[in-house]
Amino acid sequence: MNKISWLIVYTSIFSLSSVSAQTKKSTAIAKPFPAEVARPKLVVGLVVDQMRWDYLYRYYNRYSNGGFKRLINEGFSVENTFIPYTPTYTAVGHTTIYTGSVPAVHGIIGNDWYNSETKKNIYCTEDSTVVTVGSTPSSEGNMSPKNMLTTTITDELRLATNFKGKVIGISLKDRGSILPAGHAANAAYWYQGSTGNWITSSYYMKEVPMWIADYNKLKLANKFYAKNWETLYPINTYVNSTGDEKAYEGKTSTFPHQLAQNIDKNFDAIRSTPYGNTITLDLAKLAILSEDLGQDNITDFLAVSCSSTDYVGHAYGPNSIEAEDTYLRLDKDFEEFFNYLDKKVGKGNYTVFLSADHGVAHVPGFMKENKLPGGTVSDRDIVFKLNAFLNEKFKVNNVVLKSMNNQIIFDHDKTDNGTVSFDVIKNASIEFLKRMDGFANVVDISRISLATLPEIQKKMITNGYNARRSGDLYYILDPNWFNGSSTGTTHGNWNPYDAHIPLVFMGWGIKPGASNKTHYMSDIAPTLAALLHIQMPNGCVGEPITEITNK
């Protein structure tokens, strides 16, 4: 055999030996394939209505180890999470969290909007085809998710499990329960302030389960009314807040807040106290127990929204003792809730995330008191002044129908009459509004790409614009200016105090840590989809947050 033949044989033997060695090595370290897709037994979504991101740390030193501190230290905090659209309102935030989409796609552009076809205001969850279930008939129960145009992550879980995984939504607010629970939910429950009952609608069921009916008989609000509302700790220790009595806060802004007069009379008053969050989480625990959530290997989903933080925040503002006390009490409620999950579902068997639907601006009176800029505008005033201007200039009477959601809505029947072009009316309106106090800019929404705006504002307005439901002009206010009154505060603008929200994941599949990388509210649903190995919602525009997992 010549040298070339020996070389070929030798090379072949060496190659075969190498392959054999690699095969043995691979076989030795190969792990068995998983028998099934790994998923948590329960996912819990916690949305704290009106929670600014800084609340995670503003009261951190006073939080217990089992509530917010546990979330931050055992979980993964996505510190730089922003809302990607404007205006920043409750219904829009809840919908975006659970759809991974934006108003341009999912259609929920505000808590309310104007339907130019029917010439009527539309409430985000209104549905005249369904009726109240669980209490006396009222418009409070004529609700469903039909106005939401896309699926939610909760819908996708139902689809992925062939409708075996249970989905339940719970909130004092109908929109905080219905929109997160999605179209295919087993149930959504919300609070009827006129009776003190937790109700649902015929969209979900013909009658409420016995555990809801029995719970309603307790009229639990009375128990808390009897306690009144006193500070959890000595009032002189609330050093992160302004004084107790401020003229720019709500009408009854002095502790202790007297509640006993509401017993059996005003069940709705519980909303504006921290006890509203307590009864919400109490019902959530009862739902876990009564519906056997997280008790088998098919993932269930409980969507909970704590709304009292919003009611308190609107009345008293983010620098009030009321706000601080509400968060300290919510921290205690979360500690009990997490302990219950540990006991009932098992620590490590559930995944929880906490976020918010929006933040909040400081009360203008507080800003003025501290030599900081801020102020208010009025929708009614805007419509009156703009109509007067247009009438005088073009002889068109009441051509402006609405100012809502930072948008101007014109009566198109009057703008299309041939007397003066709609473009001329819009351009004149833009120039007029720009001269009003508090207005930073005004743009034609249908031509937003041509507007000279910071890119972040242009992007947020575009994401919030739905061609069928939005108005004609969008106005941008100066920082800490908003549509409101002389007392209390609100939200809705593009600014960080309204758009920077907390986002913390904890539990199954989550590693402890934090990131300051910029993410968006619309990234929450695709992150959950990736974690659960299911399809993302059908209008999703977000991306998974990959750094949270321990894989």
Image (cartoon, rainbow, N blue to C red):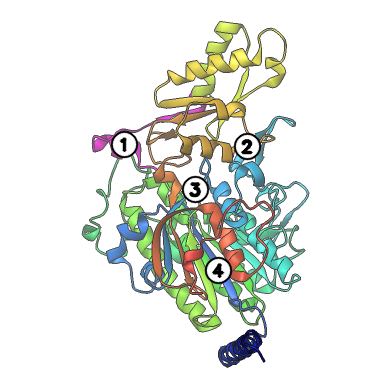
Q: Position of residue 220 (x, y in %)?
A: 52, 66
**Which amino acid, by three-letter code, is at mark 1?**
Gly
Earlier sequence position, callout 2 versus callout 3: 3
Mark 4–mark 2 Cα distance, whole angstroms, equals 30 Å
Lateral position of residue 202 relative to residue 462, left or right: right
Identified by mark 2, the residue type is Trp
Judge whether 346 appears above or below 246 on screen: below
Q: Which is more foreground, mark 4 or mark 3?
A: 3
Residue underneath mark 3: 83
Instruction: Identify the element where label 3 is drawn.
Output: loop
Residue at x 78%, y 49% (from the top left corner)? 129
Q: Residue at x 68, y 67 (%)?
A: 157
Q: Which is more N-terminal, label 1 or label 3?
A: 3
Proximity of marks 4 and 1: CB atoms separated by less than 8 Å: no
From the image, state whether disc 4 or disc 1 is nearer to you. Answer: 4
Give me the C-alpha separation between circle 3 and circle 1: 26 Å
The residue type indicated by label 4 comes to Val
Q: Relative to residue 107, is residue 375 drawn left or right?
A: left
Kind of residue sitting beneath label 3: Ile
Are circles 2 and 1 on residues that touch, CB within 8 Å?
no
User: Mark 3 Cα within 10 Å, few/some/many (few <14, many 20+)?
Assistant: many
At horizontal 59% and vertical 59% (from top left) the residue drawn is: 525
According to the picture, the residue beneath numbered tag 1 turns out to be 365
**Residues rendered magenta in the picture:** 361-381
**Cβ atoms at labels 4 and 3 below 8 Å apart:** no
Disc marking residue 113: 2
Instruction: Name the front one of labels 3 and 1.
Output: 3
Cα distance between the residues tagged 4 and 1: 38 Å
Residue annotated with mark 4: 44
Q: Nearer the viewer, mark 2 or mark 3?
A: 3
